[in-house]
Amino acid sequence: MHRVHDWVGRKDRHPTAVDAVVQRADGTVTPVKLTNCTEEGCRLESDENFRIGEQLSIAIPRMGQIRAQVRWALPGSAGAKFVSESDF
């Protein structure tokens, strides 16, 4: 692959279809589907809209609670970056 100068790569996405639950800062709970994941974050799909910068706690089956921050958002989907407890 030919890369353009100043091009910033990103980790390969791993397609998935995992039902999860997001708890928002205001305490509301929203069902989501994770449609891809990396070691750094994931894509969420939901009937709810998310806001860029929003802090989330994602309950993922067999993995437990993972803290994340919304990095991009479109109607029906969002990208979240996993963050440490101290960043929350």
Image (spheres, helix red, strand yellow):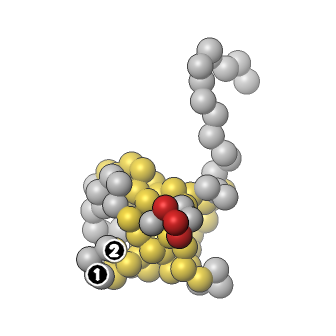
x, y percentage for residue 54? Answer: 34, 61
The residue identified by callout 1 is 28
Q: Is 61 left or right of 58, judged from the image as shown?
A: right
Q: Is 68 left or right of 73, judged from the image as shown?
A: right
Identify the disc placed on residue 4.
none
Residue 84 lies in what quarter of the image? bottom right
Q: Is 33 left or right of 30, judged from the image as shown?
A: right
Relative to residue 39, is residue 61 depicted above or below?
below
Name the kind of residue labelled 2 in the image: Arg
Q: Does residue 84 appear anywhere in the picture?
A: yes
Q: Do the residues bearing badges 2 and 1 touch, measured as CB atoms within 8 Å?
A: yes
Which type of secondary structure does the marked residue at label 2 adopt? strand
Which type of secondary structure does the marked residue at label 1 adopt? loop
x, y percentage for residue 20? Answer: 49, 78
Frontmost residue, 82 versus 60: 82
The residue identified by callout 2 is 24
The residue positioned 32% from the left and 73% from the top of the image is 25
Name the kind of residue labelled 1 in the image: Thr
Locate the C terminus and report the quarter of the image it occupies. bottom left
Q: How far apart are marks 2 and 1 (CA)?
A: 5 Å
Frontmost residue, 14 versus 39: 39
Q: Does residue 19 appear anywhere in the picture?
A: no
